[in-house]
Image (spheres, helix red, strand yellow):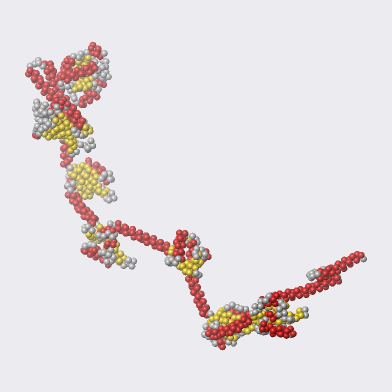
Amino acid sequence: VALLGVFLARTFTEPVHQLIQGAETISGGSLDYRIPVDVRDEIGQLAGAFNEMADNLRRSLQEIWESEKKFRGLLETAPDGIVVVNSDGHIVLVNPQTEKVFGYSRDELLGKPVEILMPERFREVHVEHRQGYCAHPITRPMGLDLALVGRRKDGSEFPADISLSPLEIEGRAFVMSLIRDITKRKQVEEALRDSEKRYRDLAETARDIIFALSGDGIIISLNPAFETITGWLRTEWIGKPFEAMVHPDDLPHTMELFQRVLQGEAPPLFEARILSKSGELVIVELTATLQVRDGKMISVLGIARDITERKRIEQERQEKEAWYRMLLEKYPDGVALSVEDKVVYTNPTLCEMAGYTVEEMVGRSPVEFIIQEDRERVIQRIRELLAGGPEYPSQYQVVKKDGSHRAIEVISRCISHDGKPTLLSIIRDITARKRAEEALRERTEALTEERNLLRTLIDNLPDYIFIKDPESRFVVNNVAHLHVLRAITQDEVAGKTDFDIFPRELAEQYYADEQMVIRSGTPLINREETTIDPEGRQQWLLTTKVPVRNSQGQIVGLVGMSRNITTLKQTEAALRESEARYRAIFDRAALGIGRVDLEGRTVESNRALQEMLGYSAGELQSMSFVEFTHPDDAQKDWDLFQELITGQRDHFQMEKRFIQKDGRLIWVNLTSSLVRDAAGHPQFAFGMAEDITARKQAEEELKQAAAELTRSNAELEQFAYVASHDLQEPLRMVTSYLQLLERRYQGQLDEKADKFIAYAVEGAARMQTLIQELLAYSRVGTRGQPFAPTDCQAVAEAAVANLGAAIQESGAVVIRAGLPTVLADATQLTQVFQNLIGNAIKFRRAAPPQIHVGAEREKGAWVFRVRDNGIGIAPEFTERIFVIFQRLHSRDEYPGTGMGLAICKKIVERHGGRIWVESEPGQGSTFYFTLPDRGGIL
Amino acid sequence: MMKSAASLKPIEILLVEDNRGDVDLTLETLEEIKVHTTLHVITDGVEALAFLRREGAYSHAPRPDLILLDLNLPKKDGREVLAEIKTDEHLRRIPVVVLTTSQAEQDILQSYDLHANCYITKPVDLDQFIQIVQAIEEFWLTIMRLPAR
């Protein structure tokens, strides 16, 4: 039981406790509190009911609170002024809107009679009305259009719409009035009325169609503009469905919009085509709205504006715009606009030109696209243009995006766009043009150069070159020809003709030739003609004149070339003369002349040769020279001939023997030479033979004579030798023994014997002298020394020294001066001087001898002289004194053998000189001898 | 020594000369100048060589101290004699004086080529001749030292 009691206690007391606790909690305000419910028992059911009750309570309280909140919110936020008045007419409540409408604050109104809110003129009446109302309170709504007026704190009045509602709160009656300032509404209504009238007027006078449609699309009304625009009468269409007027293509859209209007939407303007009476379509732009009055649709009101013209203009404008756009887009030049150094527009051509896209170009400075070197110029140019400078094209180089360069020509104009200075630029790619220009320039230069070259060429030709027009007037003349025309520059002869320069006959001839060439079109080739040079001499010309044709083949002039062949002509003439002369020489020469080919065969022979050989010309023809040459000479002649042909020698000369036709021999002196052609190849040989047979014979005889002479000379030498040796031997015996005899026996014989012995001794002595001198004479030629440079001064000194005794004895004065050095045999020359000086001393007069020795140079030789003041020589003896053994005086007067001068003569002659004497008896003598001055080297 | 020898014994001179005049003239001259000499005179070249080589009749001939040789000799002329003397080793040392009338250059040159010791042209004048002989005697026999015999 206890256990049960515990169980019960626990089962029943716990929920009850909870129940009591929950009721207390809820009553304390915690309405959300709920008792934990265990529905298994009665107490659980009770708790559930309790909870339900708590829920209901909470719900009704909630409703009250929300109503209160709503009401308060309504009061606070109501658009109308709310004023609650008690039964005494005093204000007990106002909302914020009331304060706003009337300009009073809440405190100023609370507790005041409500009449404070109305003009004074209505206040008394209102008190009555209020009392009346209180007796029979009814709810009076707004909008009954009672002309009620409110008064603001500032005294101003306003139309008001006021509703009244009786209130009973906690048994007391109040009146709540809602006050709405209807000033605006009144004004709107007023305006609406005015407007309606205006609209009506407007509708009547509007240029747009104003129409009204019923909900099913029947036309209710139309204004007069309808008639103007469509040509229909309004009566023709009122009462008819509008669809019939709309172009079928526009109908679905129109109907759709109509439905939308009916739905209350405000659709946008739309266009539709309607049919005019004339059948033309009229484009209208229309809008429509649903007209509702008092929540009921009255009509659909619309306006349709005729935009046919506008459309047309718009289309035109669009077309034009398309044209302009196309113009810009397709413009072959680049077009750009730039503002404030920024590109704002480029056309595709420019983009293509620069290799950039529009986006890449716009916004950048135009200068950036120009190569560095041109930038300064561009900047300068832009500055100029912005300053109103002149417009003219400028050329620059642009850098394309790929880095390549293009040449451009830019012409810009400064325009004002949006009030900003804007540069409009047209850019043309002139790269190709530049290249073409460059190519043209190069071509022009090349042509000019070629022309100059050609001009230089023709000016430097010695030939005369000229171009004439069809009237034979000079057009072009080279320098050589200008000279002939007595001119220096082309201008001097421009337009002139030959008639202005040359004698008439010449000019006529030239003119006739040229006219022939021009008329016939046939060139005149190599015409020989004459002209007169500026010095007045006749000149021969070889002239060619060729017609000059233009591209159409018409003859427009002629070109002439003249070569001065005067010299050639003269040479020709001279050559002919020369030829004739040489032919004459050949034919008539005393020399035998033959021409032989390279095999030695005679090709040509002259008469002299034919006569020399005894053959006729025909017989000699083709005969080899070997055939008429003596066999002993043939080999040598042939060898020399071969040397001639092979070029080892130019010519040769030989003495040879010809065999005449009859077999006799003749000696000739043959001179042979070779003739070569221009290239140096041997052509033929000439032989010239001089008959020297006679000379040869003479030579032979001379040779024999010479041999004879040599032999006789040798014999003479031998004789001299024999004389010197063998003749002296017996002479010596005679002399020696005579002397011995004299020595031993003098005085032992008689006087006569002594005298005889003396004669014998003297004779022997003289004979010995003779032999000695003869020997000396013979030895001059055979025992001489070779010539050597010899100082004649020294030689003379030696001679004087040798003559020392004689000079001293005679008191002679020997003056020697100016003696040269010569090539000589010094010993022999000493002999000459000694002999001459010795003679001068020997053949003296009483006075002491004065002897002058000197020399002078004369015509390549030295002339020596030895002058004395001696006895002189008679003219008839001047030759004789030089002959051996010749004496002029007796031995008693002047001793001597007569050999001295002969020896001198022989010595001088051996030296190639000669000796002579100039003298007069009693006047002294001058002996001269010459010695050749050999080469003047000494 | 030579002087003493000379004083004891006469000087032997061989004169080869075909001209009797010249021989006598030489003898006369030598006599005149009183020189103590023995002059042996031979008149042709063959004989002269025989004398020198002591052949035949000359087996006892003395060896001369000096030979005076003429160029123009019968049988064998002086040039040949000179050549043979100068090529004979027993004779070549004997001085040979060529004494001749020839003044010909070629004779002079040839004589010296054949080793003549002296060439003298006989003078025409007697006094000159005496002087020359005297000079020869003095020079060759007194001044010069001759090889021993």
- Residue positioned most to the top: B8
Is residue A913 at least partly visible in the picture? no
Of A747 and A148, the residue lying toward us: A148
Picture coordinates of residue A457, whole percent (x, y): 31, 57
Relative to A720, A129 lies left or right: right
Q: Is residue A356 above or below residue A586?
A: below
Q: Is residue A67 above or below residue B7?
A: below
Of A319 and A107, the residue lying toward us: A107
Quarter holding the C terminus of chain A?
top left
Q: Is residue A589 above or below residue A225?
A: above
Picture coordinates of residue A533, whole percent (x, y): 23, 58
Of A637 and A858, the residue lying toward us: A858
How many numbered discs, if any? 0
Picture coordinates of residue A198, whole percent (x, y): 57, 83
- Within the image, what quadrant is residue B64 found in? top left
Query: Residue at the spot x=72%, y=75% of the render?
Result: A72
- Residue positioned most to the right: A1
Picture coordinates of residue A513, whole percent (x, y): 25, 64
Query: Residue at the spot x=8%, y=20% of the render?
Result: A756
Is residue A12 at least partly visible in the picture? yes
Of A692 and A91, the residue lying toward us: A91
Quarter holding the N terminus of chain A?
bottom right
- Within the image, what quadrant is residue A133 found in? bottom right
- Within the image, what quadrant is residue A445 found in? bottom left
